[in-house]
Image: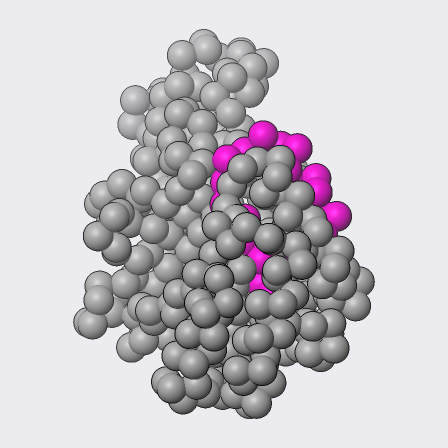
Amino acid sequence: MTLQDKTDLGGMTLSEMEAYIVSIGQSKFRAKQINDWIRRGCDFAEMTNLPRALRDTLETTCYTGLPRIAEKYVSAIDGTVKYLFEFPDGQCVESVVMFYHHGTTICISSQVGCRMGCKFCASTIGGKVRDLSASEMLGQIEVAARDIGERIDGVVMMGIGEPLDNYENTVRFLHLVTSPDGGGIGARHISLSTSGLADKIRALEKEDLQITLSISLHAPNDETRSAIMPVNKKFGIDELLSAAKHYFDVTGRRVSMEYTLISGKNDTVRDALALAATLRRYFARGDALHINLIPVNPVRETGFAAGSRESVRAFADTLEQNGFTATVRRTLGPDINASCGQLRRANLQNKERTPV
Ligand code: SAH
């Protein structure tokens, strides 16, 4: 039986799992046992309170979505943990666990690779290989929590992939991760970051999820944005920011704007003034959004560099003076290449070099 033919138990709610377990002639209470194991990061072979025959049947016919830890790095500076996770089909993604004083947060991937083509991003080089299932998104959290031996309090969908380009699975994941029988993580502790699929943002606001929406804006105008983010040619800034504002109006959730500062491309005081003016057209109330400034993380293949510390400060100050709150993101795990996309690429390149 190939992976696609298997029944994806890890992506089911408890009641769906119960219906399935009953349909294969088992007692309903087995579903709760299986669910508890999967949510604790344990695969079928470890489900010791199930009869051996049932374990074997599940092993050959069902899927948990739990990845294997292929590589793991722990930052000596701040304890940040980076995983290269491998799914049974051999595909790999990255996740990062960050320890903040307000709790432990995981950054997860939503696709193997990405097809958005952002010029500064390592994850998109080589395009998209496949979508992740809801169980595989949840599986990253379950395996990481088990490995670090503690609860994960928050999730950011900022790893490899564009979550809204994998809409159905992402929404299923969001419902599962917030349900008490699933991840049990509060929606307010979950952020979804998008490169700007405005149509999907409009769909997301109807899902009745209290998650935080992050927009990867990265430019003050269409000309600059289209040059670094091809998605802008499909959904320009006007469509994107209108959708973001609408999301705020409908959900009441403050929207985050991500702005990666790239030297000589989008990081002058003039750009900051233009950004404030653009945002002002949609968000009259400064408290409806928060701006995160991220000095670009240099990726060998892109050739983009971050500006000086002073230029970053000047950019942030200009936004503040114009009524917007802006935070310069602290870099975590600088010694372990914690930013996404690069570990998977290094792994692929190693595989390519390895003689077979
Ligand atoms: N596809 C989604 C989520 C994944 S990327 C999105 O685009 O939002 C997560 C964030 O990292 C995005 O804001 C993305 O623009 C940013 N990013 C990607 N490559 C980067 C780099 N080299 N330096 C800094 N930020 C980067």
Residue 266 at x, y percent in the picture? 58, 81
Q: Which image quadrant for residue 167?
A: top right
**Nearer to the camera, 51 or 308:** 308
Name which residue lies at 34% across and 63% down: 82
Name which residue lies at 59% across and 79% down: 271
- Residue 143 is a magenta residue: no
Name which residue lies at 61% across and 39% down: 249
Describe residue 219's horizontal placement relative to residue 267 as left or right.
right
Q: Is residue 153 visible?
A: yes
Locate the N terminus by quadrant.
top right
Name which residue lies at 57% across and 90% down: 264
Above or below residue 2? Residue 251 is above
**Nearer to the camera, 112 or 116:** 116
Residue 331 at x, y percent in the picture? 34, 71
Q: Is residue 92 visible?
A: no
Above or below residue 324? Residue 39 is above
Q: Which image quadrant for residue 48?
A: top left
Residue 14 at x, y percent in the picture? 47, 21
Spot the residue most to the right.
234
Residue 29 at x, y percent in the picture? 40, 12
- Residue 213 is a magenta residue: yes
The region drawn magenta spans 196-217
**Nearer to the camera, 238 or 170:** 238
